[in-house]
Each structure stands twice: as C-alpha cells, then as structure tokens.
Image (spheres, grey):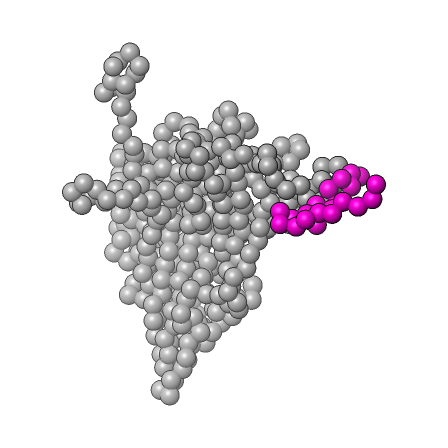
C-alpha cells in the first residue's frame, strides 16, 4: 500500500529511548512552564505547540505519571499529574499557592520525543496529549523526617464534558456564582424528592 | 560553598556508583526473553551509595559527624569524588613530586605534588551533546572507559565517562561520552581526568545509618546515599 506511505520503507522501528515533555501554558501574557523526564536540561526548538521553545528542566523521576487514557470510548476520567518530594521546587510551590488562579484552566501538553542510542533527539516532539488544568493541590503525608509533600494537578482533556448535566440540582451557590444577585434557587436545599411541599398563600 | 566529600569516604569498596535510570516497561514479551523496556531518562544520572563505612578511628568519626552536620545545616550539595584508580588514563593517576624551580624542596624536605591528568576542550560542547574533542597532554592517550569531570557555570562539576575514542589527530582526541552533557561547555575548559567527581546531594532520609550508633567498643559504621542534583 505504497499509496498511503505505509510501505516497508516508511516503517521506522521505535528506538529504545524516549523523553517525555510536560508543558504548562498559563498567565497573561502567556508563560510556559517546562518539565521533562530526562535527567538534566533538555533544550527543545520552537514548534506549533511550544511556540517559543526553551529548556525543559528535569523532574527527579516520572513516578507520578498516570496512564494517559486519551480514550474515545467514553471512559476517560481525567488525569492527575503528581510530583512528590524533593522535585517540588519553589517555582512549583508558587504555582500551587500564589499563582493558583493562573494555573486553573491553563493548557497542559504532554509530548514524546524518540532518542537515538546516543540519547540524541530524533525529530521534534510529538505532542500527544492536551488537557486543561484544574486547581493545583498540595498534600503532605507522613510526619517528621519522612514526611512527603506531593503536589498534584488535576487535568481534563476535551473528551470530558465539564458542563452541568442537563438534569441536575440547581444549588443556591451555583446560581449565585452564575448570577450574583439572583435569589431564585435559594430555597432549593429545602426541596427533596420524598417531601411534600405545601404551597401556602393565595 | 559546595564542599567536597573527603576522599577516605569515597574509596572503592566503600562506595558503589551506579546510573539507575528510569524505564517504562512494555509488558510481557512473546518468548519471555528480551524485556520490552524503553528508557525515559535521557541517559540518566549518577547515584553513589556508601554502605557501612567503618568509623574506626577518632578522625573518621569526627569527620563523619562534621559532614552530616555541615550538609544538614547549610547547603546540602556536596562534591563526591569518583574513585578512578585503574580506570584513569595512563597520563593521570599518579602525582609527581616536583621541587621548586631551583631544585630545592620545602623546609621539611617535602615536594610539590603535581598532576598531569588534565586535558582541555578543543571545541565548544553543546547542551546534551555526547561527543567532544579533547586536547590531551603530550604522550597522553585514551582508550575508552576513563572517567572525567567538567566544571560548568550552572551545574558545577559533573562526572562523565569516555565511551569510545573515534578519532585521534595529533594530541586532539575525538571521543564519545556519557551521560549527555549537563550544560554547554566552552572551548578551553579543563577536562579533569586526575580527580573525577560529581556534584551530588545526600539523601539523608533514605540513608539508614547516616547517624552512627557507637557500640561499647567505640566502633561504628555509617551509610549514606548520594544522588546527582539539579536544584
């Protein structure tokens, strides 16, 4: 089937090494936060996603990387990027605390790049996954010298619908957030499927 | 200031070096033979483990106490010497005794110790490059397998290994090395084959026995793990 470029000539076997790149675009003007699974710095040239290019910094080990299910069968649940322990630098902490508002809704891209047997790049980064960041969280588990601080960033891809379901309870808080002066839903907590509502007054 | 771990704690037999790496497993292979793994660390980094080094003299005990106190109270970074020994190239490894220029020694008959185990970079080395040109000292040669270190402005002193010598023209040897260059290095930089070393960080909380327990014989042993650091 040479017509569509699937001949043996076009086949390129996977190399035994690859690098994972994480790109977070947030803020106005847009700033790029770059991290990679590679130990050490990795400079990547500009492309369609990372429009300026730059140096990706080492994460200690990609231990907190979940399975990225970019499923189109409807089972996609969203993912959570987690970073534990000494990998949390003041930059990351600032994102989780001071710059929380910038991070929520920021674009996250995850890409791969094949590396040859001398660990040199083959081609550019294949940006495989795009998602929208939620609110970052910082957790601390354990105690004393063994306490581990974990920073996590929930993210959802386009396959997950973030809209309110068509049939849903309208809460006073939800209505107030949409329309601050509208008191229409203020009494909805009093409603229940098994209670009988007595309408009074004429 | 980045301190240097005393060489007595970095000798071979005391300290084991490794490049553990990070891999993604591809699951079961058909014949259960070749594991399907792919490397994701881009060449990895160095880890050094000191296991049960003997604190058997007052000097070693005090030195160890001073180390754990210093790196805990201040900058945790530490330069850890790599025990080269027989891995060193022929032109390095032994320090020559050198007198003053008028052939006289010091007052106590001791001499200068001078080493010749240094090369220089012949051309710039880019970030993450794995090939470079070294100007070797006269009569110097490399075979592959030699450890060396480069000191850059951002990440300090880093440890590398010669993978292969691909070309020799006069005193200039073209070599491949690993792990990939931690930062860009400029031509003329010293290539240290004499005392290869690496900037690392002690992982105190994963080091059982960083704080030794002294028995009744006043003997103790201590352990610590060091990891190449980026922060």
Taking depth in this image into account, of B135 and A89 the one nearest to the observer is A89
Residues in magenta?
A: A180-202
Location of residue B81 with respect to A175 vertically, above or below: below
Q: Is residue B31 magenta?
A: no
Q: Is residue B13 left or right of residue A61?
A: left
Quadrant of the rendered structure where residue A73 is? Answer: top left
Residue B119 seen in render: no
Q: Which quarter of the rendered picture does the N terminus of chain A lie within?
A: top left
Residue B167 seen in render: yes
Residue at x 53%, y 57% (from the top left corner): A149
Residue at x 51%, y 35% (from the top left corner): A160
Q: Is residue B58 left or right of residue A98?
A: left
Give the image location of residue B104, x and y in percent: 39, 63
Q: Main secondary structure of the magenta part?
A: loop
Give the image location of residue A193, x and y in percent: 62, 47
Residue sitting at the far left: B31
- Number of labels in the image equals 0
Taking depth in this image into account, of A199 and A10 the one nearest to the observer is A199
Q: Which quarter of the rendered picture does the C terminus of chain A lie within?
A: top right
Residue sitting at the far top: A3
Q: Is residue A183 magenta?
A: yes
Taking depth in this image into account, of B63 and A7 the one nearest to the observer is A7
Residue at x 18%, y 40% (from the top left corner): B30
Give the image location of residue B148, x and y in percent: 35, 49
Residue at x 36%, y 47% (from the top left corner): B22
Residue sitting at the far front: A202
Residue sitting at the far right: A202
Give the image location of residue A175, x and y in percent: 71, 40
């Amino acid at each position: 089937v040479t017509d569509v470029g699937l001949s043996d000539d076009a086949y390129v076997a996977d190399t035994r090494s690859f690098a994972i790149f994480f790109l977070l675009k947030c803020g106005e003007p847009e700033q790029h936060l770059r991290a990679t699974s590679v130990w050490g710095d990795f400079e990547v040239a500009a492309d369609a996603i990372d429009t300026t290019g730059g140096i990706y910094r080492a994460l200690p080990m990609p231990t907190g990387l979940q399975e990225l299910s970019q499923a189109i069968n409807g089972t996609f649940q969203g993912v959570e990027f987690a970073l534990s322990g000494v990998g949390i630098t003041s930059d990351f902490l600032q994102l989780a605390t001071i710059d929380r508002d910038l991070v929520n809704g920021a674009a996250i891209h995850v890409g791969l790049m094949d590396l040859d047997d001398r660990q040199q790049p083959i081609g550019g980064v294949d940006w495989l996954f795009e998602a929208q960041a939620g609110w970052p969280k910082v957790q601390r588990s354990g105690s004393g010298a063994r306490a581990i601080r974990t920073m996590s960033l929930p993210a959802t891809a386009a396959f997950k619908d973030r809209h309110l379901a068509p049939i849903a309870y309208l809460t006073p808080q939800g209505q107030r957030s949409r329309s601050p002066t509208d008191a229409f839903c203020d009494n909805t907590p009093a409603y229940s499927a098994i209670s009988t509502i007595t309408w009074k007054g004429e | 200031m980045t301190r240097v771990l005393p060489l007595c704690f970095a000798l071979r037999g005391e300290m084991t070096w490794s490049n553990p790496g990070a891999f993604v497993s591809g699951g079961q292979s058909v014949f259960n033979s070749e594991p399907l793994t792919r490397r994701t660390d881009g060449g990895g980094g160095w880890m050094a483990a000191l296991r049960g080094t003997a604190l058997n003299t007052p000097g070693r005990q005090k030195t160890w106490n001073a180390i754990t106190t210093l790196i805990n109270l201040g900058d945790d970074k530490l330069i850890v010497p790599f025990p080269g020994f027989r891995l060193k190239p022929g032109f390095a490894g032994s320090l020559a005794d050198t007198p003053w220029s008028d052939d006289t020694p010091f007052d106590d008959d001791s001499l200068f110790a001078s080493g010749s185990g240094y090369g220089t970079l012949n051309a710039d080395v880019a970030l993450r490059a794995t090939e470079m040109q070294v100007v070797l000292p006269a009569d110097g040669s490399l075979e592959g397998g030699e450890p060396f270190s480069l000191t850059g402005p951002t990440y300090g002193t880093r440890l590398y290994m010669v993978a292969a010598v691909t070309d020799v023209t006069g005193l200039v040897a073209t070599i491949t090395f690993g792990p990939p260059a931690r930062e860009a290095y400029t031509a003329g930089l010293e290539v240290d084959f004499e005392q290869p070393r690496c900037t690392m960080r002690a992982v105190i909380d994963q080091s059982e026995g960083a704080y030794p327990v002294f028995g009744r014989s006043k003997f103790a042993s201590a352990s610590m793990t060091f990891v190449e650091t980026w922060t």
